[in-house]
Image (cartoon, helix red, strand yellow):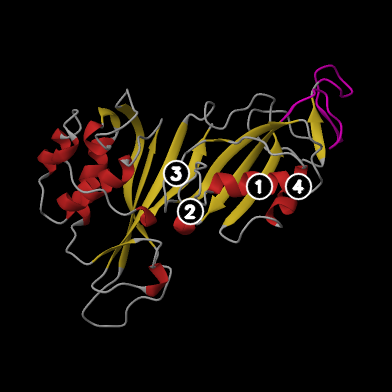
Amino acid sequence: MAEDYARGRFVSVSRRTVPGRGRREGRATTAPAYYCRDAMTTVRLDLAYNGAEFAGWAAQPGERTVQEEIEAALERVLGMRPRLTVAGRTDAGVHAWGQVASFDTEAELPRSFDRALNAVTPDDIAVWGAAVAEQGFDARRDARSRTYCYRVLAAPAPSPFERGLSLFWPHRLYPAMLERCAEAVVGTHDFTAFTPTQTEHVRFERQVMMAEWRRGRSLGPTMRSPRAGLEVFELWIEADAFMRGMVRALVGTMLEVGSGRRSLGDFTALLGGAPREEAGDTVRAHGLYLAAVGY
């Protein structure tokens, strides 16, 4: 059965959904991929990438970026180079499990479009979905929320299996205090303290719908030493939008509370628009993942 034509929702690129051409008026049916009811087709891409070797998402002269690699792959497959719109412009070193991009094209889409793209993208990028979306779908403007995950490896010694994928934290940590910090950020707050002073942002209030610390799983075997344990803690946070460096600065400050170097009251006071220098350090990028985008 053909899926309804819905904003941002997957439909087959080999059998496009066309509204109003079914047996009953208004019912959707399918047509071959080359059928084009309108001259322009909007495409949604669902992407994952390891950000270690990228200077971020956005194209930059002389730098290797995710945007440049995907646009180059699209040019090879479609014979034209579209300009991508993306839900979250990740910084250098940040990974993605659930990035979403969109573009408009007049080109004919091949069958197994995602497979064709994966054949020409580098190994640190995966195209998990390539689908026709409702015309005009915009990955950035239509997004209602973004969810990020930051992974912390709490252990006395680093794990080679977590190298470049989580923040190594050899200090003491009180999980209950991390959880209290996460509870405090839910709601609408002024996050000025958690973004760089030199910024293009003009609005510093963000609505956080969900924030919680979870116990994660290590990517390698647990330590056999009787002296020590190995735990992975993950901050999962969903908001209407994020400012540059916001999640990483929040994690850095929460870790100060979780290790007893800052009080919970001091942390909550920062949510009222305190200056950046009053908050904690910005932790490294390699522990951060864009996990999902809500529409």
Locate residue 266 relative to residue 69 in the image: left or right: left
Label ID, residue 54: 2
Residue 14 appears in the rendering: yes
Alpha carbon separation for disc pair 4 and 2:
22 Å
Alpha carbon separation for disc pair 1 and 4:
9 Å
In x, y percent, where is residue 93? 42, 54
Image quarter where the N terminus lies is top right
Locate residue 218 relative to residue 187 in the image: left or right: right
Secondary structure category for the residue under label 1: helix
**Towards the viewer: 167 or 208:** 167
**Towards the viewer: 151 or 123:** 123
- Circle 1 residue: 72
The quadrant holding residue 25 is top right
Magenta residues? 20-41
Q: Of the residues under marks 4 and 2, which one precedes in the sequence?
A: 2
Mark 4 touching mark 2, by CB under 8 A? no
- Circle 3 residue: 90
Q: Of the residues under marks 1 and 4, which one precedes in the sequence?
A: 1
Q: Which residue is at 38% across, 74% downward? A: 160
Alpha carbon separation for disc pair 3 and 1:
19 Å
* In the depicted structure, whether residue 28 falls above or below residue 246: above
Whether residue 60 appears in magenta in the rendering, the answer is: no
Q: Which residue is at 23% across, 50% downward? A: 252
Which kind of residue does numbered mark 2 sit on?
Answer: Phe
